[in-house]
Amino acid sequence: MNTLEQMNLVIVGHVDHGKSTLIGRLLADTDSLPDGKLEQVKKVCEINSKPFEYAFLLDALKDEQSQGITIDSARCFFKSNKRHYIIIDAPGHIEFLKNMVTGAARAEAAILLIDADEGVQENSKRHGYLLSMLGIKQILVAVNKMDLVNYDESVFERVKKEYTAFLKEINVEPKSFIPISAREGDFIVGASDKMPWYTGMSILEHMDDLEKEQKKEEKALRFPLQDIYKFTEKNDDRRIFAGTVQTGTLAVGDDVVFYPSGKTSKVKTIESFNTEPKTQVSVGEATGITLETQIYVKPGEIMCRANELACKVGSSFKAHLFWLGKVPLVKDKQYKLKIGTAQATVLLKDVIHVLDASNLDQNNEKTKVERHDVAECIFVTQKPIAFDLSSDVEVTGRFVIVDDYEIAGGGIITSESVEEESLLELYKAARDGSWVRGHIENRDRLYKHKARVILISSDASLDRVALAKQLEATLFEQGKAVYSMGLPNLLSGVATDLKHVPNSREEQIRRLGEMAHAFTDAGLIFISTVPELDDFELTLLKSLLTPVQVDLVNLGPNLFQSDVVDVLLDEGSSIDDQVRTVVDYLKSRLGIKRIRIL
């Protein structure tokens, strides 16, 4: 049985600095070529009166050989005594740098080549910067073509000194510098007597010395929640939380936490279709679980084990982004962010700097990100999301951005970013600053009560609407200024506008807050039903409606993490009893003395 581990490694560098030659030499010197392949390529070169190059072993396409450049991120495979390698040959030609980004993004480590004769080129610096932006920390610098400078130690030391100083500026510390000649085979898989002044390891030995990424099974559990399934047939009251284990393992009895809600429970059973009962699942397994303590969470949350590294939760983060959209990424425009199974509205808050992937020019003044740019940006979401830093857990530390139904960009999260003002606060300030009030003050209106918002929420399967209608009728019968509106009403008749709404649920909640703001500004009692309202949405609505009082009525099992429910109603009680309970609460809060139940 083959037990060798596997590592993805990218080789980058300025055009003609020897990347393909190095890979070809590694293939040949580790006996990784198919039988007769080396002789076949040499024979073809002889027939065409063309000097043999080890690069031809990799550059198999005729048009690539004729141009002498590598066009796409080719992959090849070989093995040492320690591990299997997937080598990604990333283009160095200026026109194909976007392909290099695609290739390098899959790598765990990198070899960056510098031609000893030409020295450090501008692209040598830009490639180093690009590797840094992509989060690749293990970098070997190979000073190639030492044969062209007569294996001169002073040339090697000059290149090493210059490039070390540059890497220090971008906070990159290379693992090592190695003098090599890929064409002649010096210090590729073993030592060389042509450079006795170098006593370090060869390229292959350094590759074997690189640290393998932690296996996904050994990392903290990440279980993005895809959906919740409820069963009622034959007294089956299970709620199955379904998803796929992305990292770590999950077992019956594990204490778990869902983020960003922070709700906790314990795994009761692991459910799977048409299999033997399971007590544990691991990476890649799509499964369902039931919980000992029933909680209400939504698809998109990330389940973690309570005793392991927790997800980050926030509404702002710093990221490295590669933009593919035909239209530039700009500020003050709403996009859809996808991390795992979660979706959220996101805005570009700031562009720290941009690296143009067509020529690798760095620009610190740009305020937008063009197609094929690589940028470091700060993003802000409308609501808190769960995520990881890419350096901690890659699968939940990467994201894509959707613009007008198409994936327009993707990136990795590098750090949390604490913004002084949230999107909500900025929005409120803009709204309140431009709000034009009428001439009639609320105290002059004839209503004998203060404006108020009553939110009725429950599990989606329960009937909230009947309760809201009867509560509205009861208050209206007694002369109260009251209006009831259901959440779905807020998107009716705007189907043609939905393409501008990145997340319709978020837009519904925002519109609900604005509608309630208008009704309460007129002094009314506003009633609305919201299926499966969560803690954040409640906080958002209360913030939008400050200083108006918001009363929360929860029908059925408590949906909320904290003790925020004002009236908790039994789903089995009659509507008359439910209305009576709410009215009793309002009597104590509003000073309403005479309300009879219809």
Image (cartoon, helix red, strand yellow):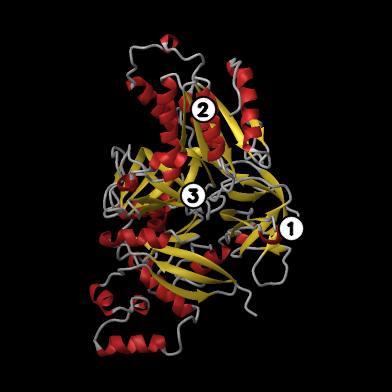
Q: Which residue is mark 1?
A: 252
State which tag comes first along the sequence, 2 or 3: 3
Please tell me which residue is depicted at 58% across the width and 29% down the height of the picture.
598
Residue to which mark 3 is pinned? 173
Q: Badge 2 local density, few (<14 within 10 Å), some, or many (20+)? A: some
How far apart in space, not on screen, are marks 1 and 3 (Cα)? 43 Å
Dot 3 surroundings within 10 Å: few (below 14), some, or many (20 or more)?
A: some
Task: Report which residue position mark 2 lands on.
Answer: 542
User: Residue 99 location in percent, x, y?
Assistant: 34, 62
* First in sequence: mark 1 vs mark 3: 3
Instruction: Tell whether 291 sits left or right of 389.
Output: right
Label 3 secondary element? loop
Q: Badge 1: how crowded within 10 Å, few (<14), some, or many (20+)?
A: some
Which of the two marks, 1 or 2, is nearer to us in this view? 2
Instruction: Give the percent coordinates (x, y) of residue 425.
Output: 44, 27
Q: Secondary structure at mark 1?
A: loop
Which three-letter amino acid code belongs to the residue tagged 3? Answer: Glu
Q: Nearer the viewer, residue 452 or 363?
A: 452
Q: Is residue 575 left or right of residue 78?
A: right
As drawn, 196 above or below 506: below
Q: Is residue 378 visible?
A: no
